[in-house]
Image: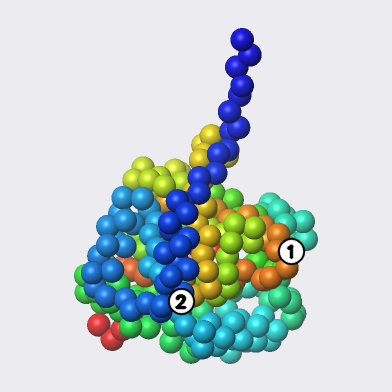
Amino acid sequence: MQVQRQPRICVLQEPSGAARRRARAVACGVTFTSDDARAALDHLAIHGWARLGVLADADRLAALRARTDAIMDTGAPELGLFFQHDSATGAYADLDFGAGWTGPSRAYRKIEGLERDPVFRAWIEAPCFATLTASAIAGPVAVSRAVLWTKATSGGTELPWHQDGGKFWGLSAQPTLTVWTALDDAPVESGCVEVLPGTHTGGLATPEGGTIPEALTADARPLQLPAVAGEVLLLHNLVWHRSRRNRTAHPRRALSVCLMSAAIRCTRTRRAPRQFARLFDR
Ligand SMILES: O=C(O)CCC(=O)C(=O)O
């Protein structure tokens, strides 16, 4: 008898009820309470990811998108942001890691330092995130990084499986809470975030952190996390996650903010240590 081989990568979809609940949240608007925060944090602790629902309304989304466009068009030199453009091929290996802002373009894949921008800062310090961090982080809160991950229409760069931690991050302790906000709808076809649930419980795949060696993900069963504009996801920094290229005619932009205790320090020694912005006046 011939035995059929299973495909190596099997993508898991959330049950359709989840999509219905998301749609309902969009229709009704959501208030975010400390009970919501605790439920999401419990889910995060077990699975390495969680949904907070749609928390950014249409006005907020319009402001964040307009500011994203302006930042890409001008480079916002007064803010000293870090820019990285898409590679011409869409392959991660072909990225230019040192070029920075190279002129107006809607195809910057990664922009860091958004906590210094007033429009983004207002969202990072929105009351829902004060509520969230009150349940998640003891004492004063700081932002270790605030990043725009964007995938231009019919483009973007393949982001391989990685963890957001390890020696490369140069921190005195490992943060665990990343808050990801969809600025646009992010369906599967546009390169939504994908995770390997539970992988955060295994610690770092390599001491350096960052990209996961390919041999470890050959049999991976990704869970795709499509999101609607305004929806917020939590990602544990150590959960293995990735995102693919955008196959739609719409941009896929998202803001990812890593929140941590303000007691965590920068341990890099080659340059002056980074100072992390404190949030929520706590
Ligand atoms: O939005 C994406 O494509 C990637 C998100 C990510 O890697 C992160 O938030 O750490």
| In the rendered image, the vertical position of residue 213 relative to residue 26, given as above or below | above
Q: Position of residue 216 (x, y in %)?
A: 51, 37
The CB of the residue at mark 1 lies under 8 Å from ligand 1: no
Which residue is pictured at 59% across the width and 61% down the height?
A: 187
**Which comes sooner in the sequence, label 2 or label 1?**
2
The image quadrant where one finds the C terminus is: bottom left
Q: Is residue 147 left or right of residue 237?
A: right
Which residue is pictured at 59% across the width and 82% down the height?
A: 65
Callout 2: SS: helix
Check disc 2 and report the residue beneath it.
27
Can residue 181 be seen by looking at this rendering?
no
* Residue nearest the observer in this picture, 82 or 138: 138
Q: Position of residue 28 (x, y in %)?
A: 41, 78
Check disc 1 and report the residue beneath it.
154
Callout 1: SS: loop
* Residue nearest the observer in this picture, 193 or 85: 193
Outermost residue toward the top in this view: 1
Q: Could you say which quadrant of the image residue 132 lies in?
A: bottom left
Q: Could you say which quadrant of the image residue 49 lies in?
A: bottom left
Which residue is pictured at 68% across the width and 61% down the height?
A: 246
Q: Is residue 121 left or right of residue 42?
A: right
Query: Which labelled disc corresponds to residue 213?
Result: none
Which residue is pictured at 51% across the width and 40% down the height?
A: 221
Q: Could you say which quadrant of the image residue 156 lies in?
A: bottom right
Colouring method of the image: rainbow
Can residue 153 be seen by looking at this rendering?
yes
Density class for disc 2 (Cα within 10 Å; few <14, some 14-19, many ≥20) is: few
